[in-house]
Image (spheres, rainbow, N blue to C red):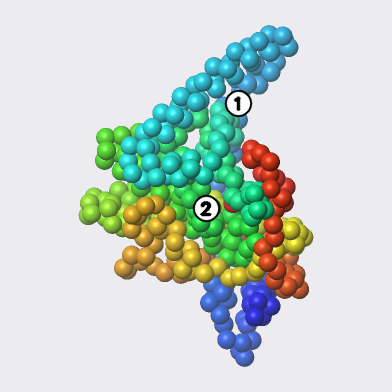
Amino acid sequence: MQEDLIDKQLAEFKAFEAGQAVADKVKPSPLYKALAGLKRVSMLPDTILSRIEVRMNNLMKTLPQRLFESLPGPVKKTLSEQFNAHLEKVMGRRVGHAVDELCTIPEGRALVEQSVAAGMTLDKFNGGNGAYGRMQGWYEGDEEGNPKLRTNMVLDVSQSHGGLINAMSHELRHFQQAKEKLTGHPFGEVISPLDNVWRNRMSEADAEATAVDIAYKLMQAGKPAAWWSATNENLEYRDMALAYEKAAKKDPSSVKDGRAKRAAFDGWFTGRSHVTNEKISEFYNGQGVLNYPPGDKILMRYEEQGGRISPLDPATLKKLGTLLPEEPNYLDLPGGKPVDSKFYREPNLNDGEMNILRQNYEAYAKLKEKPESPVKKIAPSPEPSPKPKAGTRGPG
């Protein structure tokens, strides 16, 4: 059954790439219909220039460090030790302040408490690479050798207080998703390359919608910094915050029942960056195809972990909408689009991303020769590792 599914998906993908229709005797499947509607997008010159400008601004942040590197060795060492000791204290205080504010509302407290209970670790950095934060995930063996998820959150503490809260909310939501196997690469599971793009889009939209939702509720509680950042600083996602605000003002009860959050979630797929004018969803197309294990690595991973090949179930993805205690499932509201609709699944890949997707499918097709096997054990780790181990990468 699995082999037939893989053969069908690969045949449909190749037919699409060649610009050919599936033979009349083959009934088109939902996957083919989705593929047939894919749009290829090319980056406009203005977009390229905007991206260069953003990268130049990020480079300028590192200029003081570059000047520091030109100092004599002994002077540099002394200054570096003093500066790093002070910086660590400042970064710690800033993170602590953000956590304290996040915990003033139930949604934020739940995010923090769940991550602390699971032993999540934290790394801090002070700007310079253009990232607000990221969540790393990997698997280690418990006492019985069963795979256990480990996570590490990395935060840029040079951003504003409100921006730090929003980044933390976003990344902590990714932790919740990873814990429920709703993002990344759950141990012992393999999905198709297109399903991987789809899940990546849904999990990123959910993480940012959660950050917007928490920011608005903090503002209602008299803590406006995160909402100000979402509507004034974070120009990449501003349309999501505006969509949330519009729904909330039209009907204040939409904040409680999840309709405002759904508006922000849908805004991830329609909104545009106020910096580059790209669609928000297009930022993550490359991530969706690049984070799929390339080439023979998908085969190696399957050999190491065992498990099964399976299609991504829409009912599973719908669980993204209810990861917080007593949270109404905002992805299961009356009148909302189905989670497997073309609105959410259509990747709009450019030519380079389509080439990577094709390579991913070639590797994925080889898995049809591999029999299903039980999920394998991992040698127990004497001490939790602070960094991912090779070959056991999880949702990072």
| Residue 292 in the image: above or below residue 96 | below
Residue 212, x across and y down, in percent:
38, 46
Give the label on residue 333, or none.
Answer: none
Q: Quadrant of residue 29?
A: bottom right
Residue 372 appears anywhere in the view: yes
Residue sitting farthest toward the front:
144
Query: In the image, 263: left or right of 390?
Result: left
Residue 21 versus residue 325: which sits nearer the camera?
325
Q: Quadrant of residue 88?
A: top right
Query: What residue would you read off at disc 2?
Result: 179
Residue 112 versus residue 345: which sits nearer the camera?
112
Q: Residue at the spot x=30%, y=48% of the render?
A: 245
Query: What residue would you read off at disc 1?
Result: 62
Residue 379, x across and y down, in percent:
72, 50
| Residue count near mark 1 (Cα–Cα under 10 Å), binned few <14, some 14–19, many ≥20 | some
Q: Residue at the spot x=44%, y=66% of the render?
A: 339
| For marks 1 and 2 on the same chain, the one whose residue lies earlier in the sequence | 1
Specify the amino acid type for callout 1.
Thr
